[in-house]
Amino acid sequence: MSRNRFLLLDPGTVRPGRIPLPPAFAVKATTADTEGRFSLLEVTLARDIPRHTHHVADESIYVLDGILEVEFDDRVVHAAAGAFVLLPHGVPHALRRGSTPPPRLIQISSPGGWECYLEDLIEAGPAVLTDGALDPAKINPIAARHEIRYETAR
């Protein structure tokens, strides 16, 4: 019953997951909380996210602080605090830090599952990095399980 899913989190509180995520990813609503409809995270973009495509999930972003640089399809836009970005599934995009300190945002994926992908990625540890940066070729085997594909060459 829906009323049994009521959730109120105090400031700074996050939802528990399969494994703890770094503080840059504060899970506020899990896929399980929403019966699969969406997941919601408060994110500090500590690392640039390489160009990739979600094949199923739409990604919505509301910028809380700072500037988020968004590469969408073949254009680049800068989203400042208060801006909203909808990244529909099937369209390549990348997210980059456009400010120091890095941007802080609310990220919603619909249907849910983003936090599950992050858990898998964090669990892989440094094996997905090359010279300290996310390596698309190393991420893709993990991302494929979540219907995401990173571009390995442009």
Image: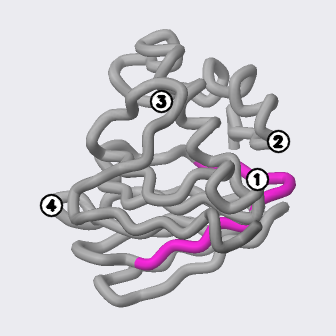
**Residue on which disc 4 sits:** 100
Chief secondary structure of the magenta portion: strand
Identify the secondary structure beneath mark 4.
loop
Q: Position of residue 49 (x, y in %)?
A: 49, 47
Residue named by callout 3: 134
The colour scheme applied to this rendered structure is one colour
Q: Position of residue 60 (x, y in %)?
A: 59, 73
**Residue drawn at the location 73% of the way across and 67% of the way down:** 58
Residue 31, percent from left and from top: 66, 52
Residue found 22% across the figure and 64% down from its top: 11
Could you tell me the amino acid type at mark 3?
Leu
Would you name the residue on which mark 1 appears? Answer: 54
Between the C-alphas of marks 4 and 1, the distance is 27 Å
Q: Amino acid at mark 2?
A: Glu
Q: Which mark is residue 147?
A: 2
Marks 2 and 3: which is nearer the front? 2
Within 10 angstroms of label 2, few (less than 14), some, or many (20 or more) residues? some
